[in-house]
């Protein structure tokens, strides 16, 4: 069995802002959404993550050994006032374009939600 992605992640240094952001994540809802998409139970470990820039990355593990990556935007002062994360929309559109128009190995986006929910 191949190692999970987190086996290759650097150990994050304790960061108060990241810890606060993680405390705002509704992991049960995240896993419920993933489970409904895959029609299979999902598990997570909130203590296994990495982060960079404005994103925090977690693993969602399914009963059959498949692992999905959940990339969540950290809430900060620069969150869109409109309530829509247009950067995320652009990233998802770019991934779709690359999948359709190149032979590069591009990860699949199973779901995204551009609505900003957490305040800094």
Image (cartoon, grey):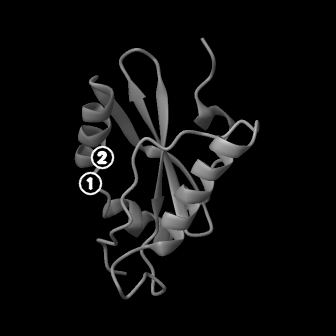
On the image, numbered disc 1 is attached to which residue? 26
Q: Residue at position x 37%, y 81% from top?
A: 120
Q: Does residue 94 appear in the picture of this structure?
A: yes
**49 lies left or right of 25:** right
x and y, in percent, of residue 82 in the image: 35, 85
Q: Using the image, tell me which numbered label, if any, was put on residue 18.
A: none
Q: Are marks 1 and 2 in contact (CB under 8 Å)?
A: yes
Q: Looking at the figure, which quarter contains the N terminus? A: top right
Residue 113 higher or lower than 109, as above or below? below
Choose top left, top right, bottom left or bottom right for residue 13. bottom right
Q: Using the image, tell me which numbered label, if any, was put on residue 30.
A: 2
Q: Does residue 10 appear in the picture of this structure?
A: no
Q: Nearer the viewer, mark 1 or mark 2?
A: 2
x and y, in percent, of residue 69 in the image: 50, 41
Choose top left, top right, bottom left or bottom right for residue 104. top right
Q: How many marks?
A: 2
Seen from the viewer's position, the closer of residues 34 and 90 is 90
Q: Secondary structure at mark 1?
A: loop
x and y, in percent, of residue 52 in the image: 63, 62
Residue 102 higher or lower than 65, as above or below? below
Q: CA distance from mark 1 to mark 2?
A: 6 Å
x and y, in percent, of residue 74 in the image: 46, 69
Seen from the viewer's position, the closer of residues 9 and 86 is 86
Taking the view exactly as shown, the residue that stands out farthest to the right is 103
Taking the view exactly as shown, the residue that stands out farthest to the top is 1
Residue 51 higher or lower than 7, as above or below? below
Choose top left, top right, bottom left or bottom right for residue 91. bottom right
Q: Secondary structure at mark 2?
A: helix
User: Dot 2, how many residues are within 10 Å of its Cα: few (below 14), some (14-19), or many (20+)?
Assistant: some
Q: Residue at position x 43%, y 41% from top?
A: 110
Q: Residue at position x 52%, y 48% from top?
A: 49
């Amino acid at each position: 069995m191949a190692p999970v992605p987190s086996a290759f992640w650097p150990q994050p240094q304790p960061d108060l802002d990241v810890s606060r952001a993680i405390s705002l994540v509704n992991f049960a809802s995240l896993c419920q959404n993933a489970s409904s998409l895959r029609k299979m139970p999902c598990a997570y470990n909130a203590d296994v993550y990495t982060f960079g820039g404005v994103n925090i990355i977690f693993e969602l593990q399914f009963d059959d050994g498949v692992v999905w990556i959940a990339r969540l935007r950290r809430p900060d002062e620069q969150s869109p006032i409109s309530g829509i994360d247009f950067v995320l929309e652009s990233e998802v559109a770019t991934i779709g374009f690359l999948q359709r128009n190149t032979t590069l190995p591009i990860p699949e986006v199973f779901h995204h939600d551009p609505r900003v929910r957490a305040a800094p």
